[in-house]
Image (cartoon, rainbow, N blue to C red):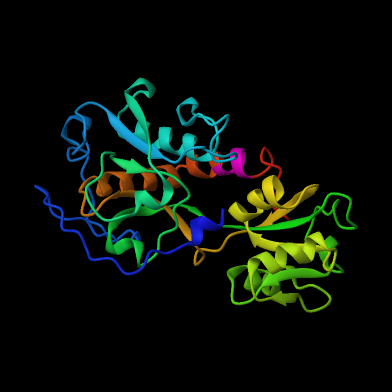
């Protein structure tokens, strides 16, 4: 999961021709608004008429996708993709999935997909080569302990007050610990994330705080017997995942409209709660 945080070196912007006015690619919601007529299914600028082509990496990991099958509608990002598709007027059978490697997705150049959904953080460097939608997920922080550790049963922030917490220097994780957990003693700060993980393995700390995508990776592949005891609520200023499009794609305005609708009526929050909280073993710590 560390790969999600890698940033490509500065890339030359790729100019994409468009019959429509170019969309803002900052991922901040400043793109021109789209009318219902502009976002009618038969008017969308698609790679294949009548089909919505969505890309992601392989293998597709849980809890973002279930059973390595993006097309089943299960898992957070599969559910988000189909919710967006539905808002654009596409039935499930009109969605086509294609496999694209993570780093390949934000390389400069033309794309053979309409958008990519793959836990891709919006960064200024990546925005030089591709266009991002508004954020569909704000990255929360996960608290990881050893499964047999003293604080493995913690269900609230208060129950972690006496824990020795490890965290990487200069990260949003450190800020979250200081502002939300407020532990009884200062967190133990390490230079690198692998140092944080090793401190947990070696029982130098009772718990570590990392971003939630990394927490899933830690428990699945890095520290045997570890568990996520919970997650801290995300703030609006934290790292965000966005749908990735070819640079300058006018489709972004309609994707932003769909994401906005899903946020406004609570659908996106329901998807988040379903797939990235209790079901994923990461309840929000109160």
Horizontal side of 101 relative to 19 (left or right) equals right
Q: Is residue 65 magenta?
A: no
Q: Which residue is drawn at 70% across and 52% down?
A: 222
Between 211 and 161, the one lying in front of the other is 211
Can residue 286 be spotted in the picture? no
Of all residues, the one furthest to the top in this rendering is 93
On screen, 105 above or below 59? below
Q: Give the range drawn in magenta.
A: 272-276
Between 52 and 106, the one lying in front of the other is 106
Q: Which residue is drawn at 17% across and 41% down?
A: 38
Can residue 72 be spotted in the picture? yes
Q: In which quarter of the image is residue 198?
A: bottom right
Q: Which residue is drawn at 56% across and 58% down?
A: 2
Q: Position of residue 164 (x, y in %)?
A: 83, 70
Of all residues, the one furthest to the bottom in this rendering is 186
Q: Where is residue 201 in the image (x, y as percent from the top left)?
A: 80, 59
Q: Is residue 275 magenta?
A: yes
Principal SS element in the magenta part? helix
Q: In which quarter of the image is residue 206?
A: bottom right
Between 254 and 1, the one lying in front of the other is 1
On screen, 164 above or below 118? below
Q: Where is residue 124 in the image (x, y as percent from the top left)?
A: 35, 67
On screen, 67 above or below 164? above
Horizontal side of 253 relative to 238 (left or right) equals left
Q: Where is residue 249 in the image (x, y as percent from the top left)?
A: 21, 49
Horizontal side of 179 relative to 138 (left or right) equals right
Q: Number of marks in the image? A: 0
Q: In which quarter of the image is the C terminus?
A: bottom right
Between 226 and 194, the one lying in front of the other is 194
């Amino acid at each position: 999961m560390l790969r999600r945080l890698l940033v490509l070196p500065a890339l030359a912007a790729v100019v994409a021709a468009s019959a429509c006015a170019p969309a803002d690619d900052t991922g901040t919601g400043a793109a021109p608004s789209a009318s219902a007529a502009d976002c009618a299914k038969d008017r969308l600028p698609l790679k294949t008429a009548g089909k919505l082509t969505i890309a992601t990496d392989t293998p597709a990991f849980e809890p973002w996708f279930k059973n390595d099958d993006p097309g089943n509608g299960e898992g957070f990002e599969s559910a988000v993709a189909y919710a967006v598709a539905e808002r654009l007027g596409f039935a499930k059978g009109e969605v086509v999935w294609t496999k694209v490697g993570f780093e390949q997705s934000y390389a400069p150049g033309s794309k053979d997909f309409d958008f990519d959904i793959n836990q891709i953080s919006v960064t200024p460097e990546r925005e030089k080569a591709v266009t991002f939608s508004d954020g569909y997920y704000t990255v929360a922080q996960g608290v990881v302990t050893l499964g047999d550790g003293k604080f493995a049963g913690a269900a609230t922030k208060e129950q972690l007050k006496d824990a020795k917490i490890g965290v990487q220097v200069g990260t949003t994780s450190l800020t979250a610990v200081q502002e939300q957990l407020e532990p009884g003693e200062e967190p133990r700060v390490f230079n690198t994330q692998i140092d944080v993980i090793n401190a947990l393995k070696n029982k130098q700390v009772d718990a570590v705080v990392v971003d939630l995508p990394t927490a899933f990776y830690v428990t699945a592949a890095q520290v045997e017997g570890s568990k996520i005891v919970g997650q801290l609520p995300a703030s609006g200023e934290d790292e965000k995942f966005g749908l990735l499009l070819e640079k300058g794609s006018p489709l972004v305005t309609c994707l932003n409209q769909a994401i906005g609708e899903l946020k406004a009526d609570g659908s996106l929050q329901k998807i988040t709660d379903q797939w990235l909280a209790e079901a994923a073993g990461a309840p929000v710590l109160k």
